[in-house]
Amino acid sequence: MNEIAARYARLSDAFADVVARVPEERWGSPSPCEGWSARDVVGHVVDTQGMFLGLVGRELGDIPEAADDPAAAWDAARAVVLADLTDPERARTGFDGHFGRTTFAEAVDRFLGFDLIVHRWDLARATGLDERIDPDDVRWARAATEFFGDSLRSEGVCGTELTPPADADEQTRLLAHLGRRAW
């Protein structure tokens, strides 16, 4: 498995772990994403997998709806993306995106990897689960924000940067940068 596929597998497994641990009564809980419930966060992450497949002319296919079964929807969506990432030809499929010419694998790594880290935290926060992000993932996600530049603040992406407490750790600083109050 190549480095990008391995990172996606690890991050998608971590997201799946949080999805699997959400208590049934917490799926309707509000998330840090304004107007979204915990279930909506999973639906967004599933939909985003399909959006990136669509950029290279592929689709998720017939998978469960996140509204009906968030865990099954996530497992099905990530299986499709991972299969494409581990197929060298499919992974190298190019397209012209917002940031110029790229490949499916590069786009998944940069954008979906970032989404998996941040929305895992959103889901954990909404449902009262462990919110800790691996310090290496915090640093990796922070570096990704540099690539995004001003696009990070586009409507529907991340909110206005917040000022974290002076003694905040790296995770709290990252989340504040993304407009999320983690303290």
Image: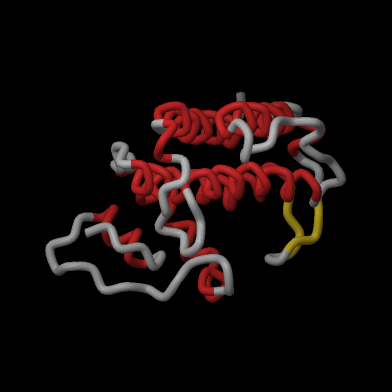
Q: Classify the position of the N terminus by image quarter.
A: top right
Q: Residue at x 38, y 48 (%)?
A: 126
Q: Position of residue 178 (x, y in %)?
A: 41, 65
- Quadrant of residue 88 within the rendered picture: top right
Colour style of the rendered protein structure = secondary structure
Nearer to the camera, 168 or 109: 168
Q: Is residue 102 left or right of residue 180?
A: right
Tell me what residue is drawn at x 46 percent, y 46 percent: 28
Of 133 and 75, which appears nearest the observer? 75
Q: Give left or right: position of 32 versus 166.
A: right
- Figure check: 60 above or below 166: above
The residue sitting at 71% across, 66% down in the picture is 98
Q: Where on the picture, by quarter, is residue 61?
A: top right
Name the outermost residue toward the right.
57
Query: Looking at the picture, how far across and down is residue 70, in whole percent?
Result: 57, 34
**Could you tell whether 181 is left or right of 23 in the image?**
left
Q: Residue at x 87, y 45 (%)?
A: 57
Q: Quadrant of the C terminus?
A: bottom left
